[in-house]
Image (cartoon, rainbow, N blue to C red):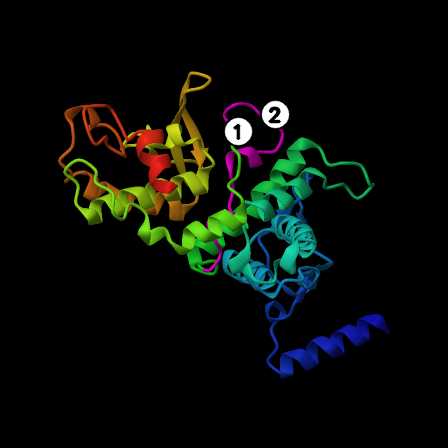
Amino acid sequence: MKEIHRTLHVGHEEMCGIKPRDKHIWDLTRISLPSIQSKSGRRRATRGTIDFTAISQPWLRELALTWARDTDPTATCLRDTVRVTAMASGRLAERPGAGTDPSRLGGADMDTVVDGVRAMRRGDGEVMARGSQRNMAHNWFNLLDFGRRTGLMNGVPTAFSRQRWHDIGHDDDEDNEGKAVPEPVIAQLDQHVNSLGAGTTYGRLTAAQIGQMFRIAYIVLRDTGRRPGEVCSLYGTCVKDGTDGPDLIWDNHKSKRHRRRLPIAEETATAIRAWLPVRATLDVPTESARYLFPADHAQPHMSSTSNFSKTLR
C-alpha cells in the first residue's frame, strides 16, 4: 500500500510538472546522481531523502539547493554538505539576528559555525574523527566558495569567510593568531572607507592614490586578521593561487617565519590585484620597489605606526 501511494504521488507530481529537484525534500530514488560503487565493485543504489528544510535561513537554503542542482554531487557529498549546512544554520539561528539577513554576517558568525564543525558527532553520538570534521569543513567552505563565484553571496560581507585559524585538526600557533576587529568597529569603518587617507600627504602620491592605497591596506587588515606590521610589509607578489583559491603570502616577523600562506576570499584578492596597476605607476623610493604599500620616504615600506595606524585613527 505504501508503494502504491508513493507511485500515485509521483505520478501526480509529474502530471503537474513538478520535478524532483524543484522540491525542498529530495527523494534520491527519483534523482539521477553520479554512480557510487561498493567495495565489491557493484553499483550501489542511492536511497532515502535529502531534507533541505533543515536549513532555516531562506538565503542559505536557496544557496544549498542551487549548489546541489548545478554541481551534480555524489550522494555522499550531497548528504554531508546538507548536513553541515543544517548544522551551520542551527548555529547561526542562535546568533543575534538568527542569520536571516546575510548582509549582517561577520567573522564572529563564521567562528561559531566552525566551532560547530569541531563539535559534530557521528550517528552513535561520539565526536567525529578529525578527518571527518575536516571533510565537513571542506564541504561547508566549498558551498560558500560556490556562492561567491556565482554571485549568490554578493551581499554577504567578506568577513564571513574562511580564515587560517578555521583549520580543523591543527593547534593554534603564532601563524593563526589574530585579534578580530569588533564588528561594530568594522561597520563604522566600512561606512567611511572612502574617507581613508583624506587630507593626508604621502610623498609624491596624489590624493586619489593615497586614498586607494589606504583603503586596500584596511581591507587586507580587516579580512585577514594579520598584524598592521605584517600588512604593511607585504610584497607586491603577495597573492598566489592556492589549492582551493587565492592565498596571501606574508611574513610572520614575530616568530621569524617567512613566506607563510593564508587562504583569503576572492574579493580580498581582487581588491589587492586592482591596486597593482596603480602601484606600478607610483613615484616612490627605490627601496620600496618590492612592496605592496610603499614608503613615503627612504625606507622599505609603509610604516605601521606613523603611517597606517595614524591614518586609521
x then y, percent, for residue 70:
50, 60
104 relative to 308, above or below: below
What residue is shown at x 44% (from left), y 33% (from top)? 226
Q: Is 174 displayed left or right of 308 in the figure?
A: right
The reply, left or right, for residue 151 in relation to residue 195 is right
Depth check: 77 or 63 in front?
63
Q: Is residue 154 left or right of residue 142?
A: left
Element under disc 2: loop
* Three-letter residue code for mark 2: Asp
Q: Is residue 266 above or below residue 301?
A: below
Camera sees residue 272: no
Residue 176 is tagged as: 1
Magenta stretch? 155-177
Whichever of callouts 1 and 2 sits on the residue coming sooner in the sequence is 2
In magenta segment, residue 25: no
User: In the structure shown, which secondary structural element does the residue marked by tag 1 occupy?
Assistant: loop
The amino acid type found where label 1 is placed reads Asn
Residue mark closest to the camera, 1 vs 2: 1
Residue in view at x 60 percent, y 73 percent: 19
Label 2 crowd bin: few (<14), some (14–19), many (20+), radius 10 Å = few
Above/below status of 254 relative to 121: above
Residue matched to label 2: 171
Indicate the position of residue 89 as horizontal and vertical percent values. 66, 55
Give the quarter of the image for residue 256. top left
The location of residue 287, given as percent across then percent down, is 19, 23
- Distance from disc 1 to disc 2, alpha carbons, whole Å, reads 9 Å
